[in-house]
Image (tube, grey):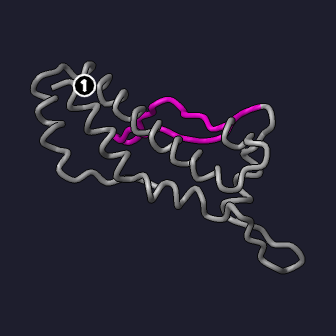
């Protein structure tokens, strides 16, 4: 899922005028990481309702900022010794057992967390960018 910025262009243009391309890249990377922290916290909070051991919450990781086709992104995922990424996928999308669709307690929780945190993500990114003005 991606987030669309509205009204963000003014802040970005001001930063472009003030900073070099490398400095602007560093600032935008910090801002994206701040936004990723907000989203990972929202996902972790959403998992609180149906946690058993808490391993799915403990294994949430934030990747590095990557750039592809001129767009920067940060991945939030699962990595750890208990390999919870396998169960998270089943929890999010459900599964079929003997032709019956099974919807666990966590069904759709990641999508719900992302949808609910879009505003907070945008606020965190904008706040981090404005610190540089």
Question: Which quadrant, please, contains the C terminus?
Answer: top left
Q: Main secondary structure of the magenta part?
A: strand
**What x and y, as percent, mark residue 3?**
37, 53
In this picture, is 130 found above or below 8? above
- Look at the numbered disc 1 and give the secondary structure of its residue: helix
Tell me if 111 is positioned left or right of 49 in this view. Answer: left
Residue 81 or 38: which is nearer the viewer?
A: 38
66 falls in the magenta region: yes
Residue stretch in magenta:
59-80
Q: Which residue is mark 1?
A: 24
Instruction: Determine the residue positioned at 68% across, 60% down.
Output: 106
x then y, percent, for residue 39: 48, 44
Q: Tell me if 90 is positioned left or right of 75 in this view.
A: right
Q: Residue at x 55, y 41 (%)?
A: 76
Tell me the quarter of the picture where residue 15 sits. top left
Furthest toward the front, the residue is 49
Q: Position of residue 5 (x, y in %)?
A: 27, 51
Q: Quadrant of residue 56?
A: top right
Q: Residue at 31%, 30% (x, y): give it.
A: 28
Tell whether 55 sits left or right of 40.
right
Rendered position, 20 above or below 5: above
Name the outermost residue toward the right: 98
The residue at the far bottom in this view is 99
Q: How many marks?
A: 1
How many residues crowd around disc 1 within 10 Å: few (fewer than 14), some, or many (20 or more)? some
Q: Is residue 115 magenta?
A: no
Q: Residue at x 76, y 52 (%)?
A: 87
Q: Is residue 93 above or below residue 80?
A: below
- Percent position (x, y) of residue 88? 71, 52
């Amino acid at each position: 899922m991606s987030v669309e910025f509205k009204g963000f262009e003014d802040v970005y243009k001001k930063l472009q005028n003030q900073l070099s391309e490398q400095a602007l890249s560093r600032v935008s990377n910090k801002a994206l990481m701040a936004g990723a922290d907000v989203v990972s916290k929202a996902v972790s909070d959403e998992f609180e309702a149906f946690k058993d051991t808490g391993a799915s919450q403990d294994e949430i990781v934030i990747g590095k900022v990557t750039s592809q086709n001129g767009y920067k992104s940060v991945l939030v995922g699962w990595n750890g010794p208990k390999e919870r990424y396998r169960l998270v996928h089943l929890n999010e999308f459900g599964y079929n057992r003997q032709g019956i669709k099974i919807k666990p307690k966590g069904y759709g929780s990641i999508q719900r967390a992302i949808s609910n945190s879009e505003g907070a993500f945008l606020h965190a990114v904008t706040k981090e960018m404005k610190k540089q003005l």
